[in-house]
Amino acid sequence: MPLGNGRVGINLWVEADGDLRFYISRTDSLSEVSRLLKVGGVRISLDPNPFKTGAPFRQELRLCDGVCEITAGKGSSQVTLAVFVDSEAPVIHVIGQSASPVKVRAAADVWRTQPRKIAGEELSSSWTLHGSPTPVIESADVFPANVGNAVAWYHRNETSPAFAATLKLQSLESVADKARDPLLHRTFGGYMTGMDFRPTSGHSLTTDSPATAFSLQIAAFCGQTESALLWLEESERLALGDVAVRDAQARTAAWWRAFWDRSWVVVDGDQADLPGGSHPLSSVTRGYTLQRYVQACGGRGPYPIKFNGGMFTVEPKAMGLPYNADWRRWGDCHWWQNVRLTCHPMLAAGDFEMMDPLFQMYESVRPLAEARARLYHAAEGCYFPETMTVWGTYSNGDYGWDRAGRLPKDVLCPYWHNAWNQGPELVSLMLDRWDYTGDETFLTGQVLPMAESALKYFDTRFKKDSAGRIVIDPTQAVETYWHGVINDMPATAGLNDITARLCALPENLTRKEQRTFFARMRAACPAVPVEEVDLGGKKVRRLSPAQKYENKRSNCENPELYGIWPFRLYGLGRPGLEEARAAYSGRNNHLDVGWGYDGNCAALLGLAGEAARILKVKCANSHPAYRWPATWGPNFDWLPDQDHGSSLLETTQLMLLQHVGNKILLLPAWPKAWDVDFKLRAPRNTVVECVYRHGKVQRLAVTPPSRRADIILPQD
């Protein structure tokens, strides 16, 4: 069962005839070779053991309070445990109550005991260094001595070979002042202590004597400290800083209850035979609720949620792989096509602060991105790699290790060497955040600088035709079309989307020169590509992957759909609905799972039956080898697949609520046979609460009330 506070997470389980165990994770526990490692593990043993096979046992994750409660044994042997992660500190709490005295042992479970060469397929867990021609060595964890009544361990990067090698390989040493090394001296680990516990052998603590009550605190601090001693001092302060464990539990429960009050989706009518009750459960309710919970567990850290498992990966033995819990397919880099998916549903859910890690990461690397544009392409502004390290460079394997005869601008991976849609998509997502919140500080301080930089790249990198329109060439249509592509749909739709929205911003929030630039760029946008095809002897107009392209597919994504999602130029209440529906029905690949966004497009096109079909497929995607129901995938990536779960959230929301201009479409793609009770957000700080039963809206509450007039009811 996963638990977390947005920064620190744990995977918790109990072994029959064994121990309570959990892995500890963070979003920023990067090693010197840029692998996102587990902080470590903890194993708690009780004597006498209440977890004997055949004894009563119940383990319950209380989503409303953010706590896992475990009851084992019966009568005088019964033990109750509560485990949670403090909502306000990187501290894990374990509280125990026993009907009879028990002896407790808590041991650190750490496997990085020796420096080790990472090679072969295992090296893909550092996508930054995958395929490295030189040995990749990861250092061991350290167990400091003499730390009082505690056990401590840490991993410290005394060097940062991944960062240094990347700047050198990618010819960025001359602009190294624009990059910040996030690896050097990064230190993370655990500091475990508890009242009446004493250190014993095996990196463990035990109670002085059998007791009927106990509590443990494990601080999981991470920082780039000047010394290991400073890390140790801060970890001790955190672990000992709040001994009132019940107060920590109360504030954690209060945080979670406020979180669940922000928004919800409760469905009835899509029942499936799922474990967990005496009657069938709603697969959508369960899938939606558990996925949003997982996002909240990992969405407030220094870096965005990792698409390939988030914080809740485990050792992949169930997948037939021999690696430990530090391994994940596709590794450490943030892939734009994937990381964006985790943020889109945070808008309607009202989880705006969980978008900050994404925006902050890209803003922090913008100076290097601008320097690279000048160095590689003699262009102004910024562009971002599809597979990006946390300091803003390409993954080295994708950039290409063999540079003989190559220019610095030559990116050797054909899947994204000429893909430019990342910048416009980022700006579009930031404008979405502005639309929902109206946060003027965010607009002027973050959105506008990023928008200007992203647009300058297109303005100065590419030629213009005789009419003054940008000709995006060289380019590609995401990973699918590589050859003969001009004015690809993803970049073209992105430019049209953001320039229109930037030009519509209030004049009092933009400078005159910004407005002039945005208007000029609006006029310079290429036309959104549309093609005419012969289907069964009938001419049909539909959205096209690009203005020109060689019809040779290299991957399964459908780039023509970008005009529908994420950019929403086409859909219900917008021009060109039939062209968009024709593109959807004629798409080459049907992508119901993983990072596929067919469900989003179906909902935006008003295809309720199709959207519902896809949503049910998504909710059934739980891997049978794992007990946690939201262990999606692995699909294209790794599990629990956060692309898949995030798309599940977004599809559900778009079926329930869409906005077109100032209008809000209620239940635009919702099956009439499904009853639903929901609370979701809409632009302009609007909250919509709806109860829909038997094909009728039975309750509708809109905040502020003035927005009620903008609601378009389904029967309208």
Image: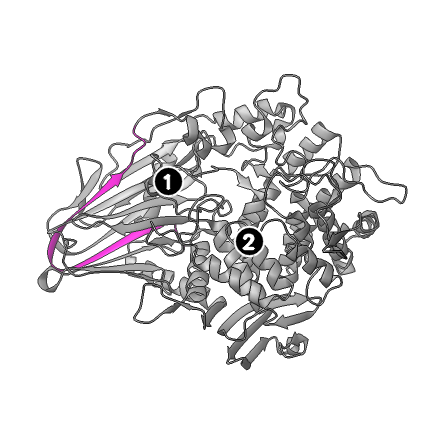
Residue 316 occupies quadrant: top left
Secondary structure type for disc 2: helix
Q: Which mark is residue 343?
A: 2
Amino acid type at circle 2 is Cys
Looking at the picture, how far across and down is residue 404, in whole percent? 63, 16
Q: Which mark is residue 38?
A: 1
Residue lying at 54% horizontally and 47% vertically, measured from the top left: 339
Q: Quadrant of the N terminus?
A: bottom left
Secondary structure type for disc 1: loop
Looking at the picture, how far across and down is residue 577, in whole percent? 72, 63
Q: Residues within 10 Å of mark 1 (few under 14, many from 20)?
A: many
**Does residue 273 appear anywhere in the picture?**
yes
Asked whether the beta carbons under mark 2 and mark 1 sit within 8 Å of each other, the answer is: no
Q: Magenta segment, which residues?
A: 88-113
Viewer-nearest residue: 216 or 602: 602
Amino acid type at circle 1 is Lys
Relative height, residue 180 to residue 21 (above, below): above
Residue 110 occupies quadrant: top left
Residue lying at 65% horizontally and 33% vertically, measured from the top left: 417
Residue 99 falls within the magenta-colored stretch: yes
**Does residue 681 appear anywhere in the picture?**
no
- Farthest residue to the right: give it: 466
Distance between mark 2 and mark 1 Cα atoms: 23 Å
Colour mode of the rendering:
one colour
Viewer-nearest residue: 335 or 688: 335
- On the picture, is 167 further left or further right than 428? left
Looking at the picture, how far across and down is residue 175, in whole percent? 64, 27
Residue lying at 57% horizontally and 71% vertically, measured from the top left: 687
- Farthest residue to the top: give it: 404
Q: Quadrant of the C terminus?
A: bottom right
Looking at the picture, how far across and down is residue 91, in whole percent? 34, 49
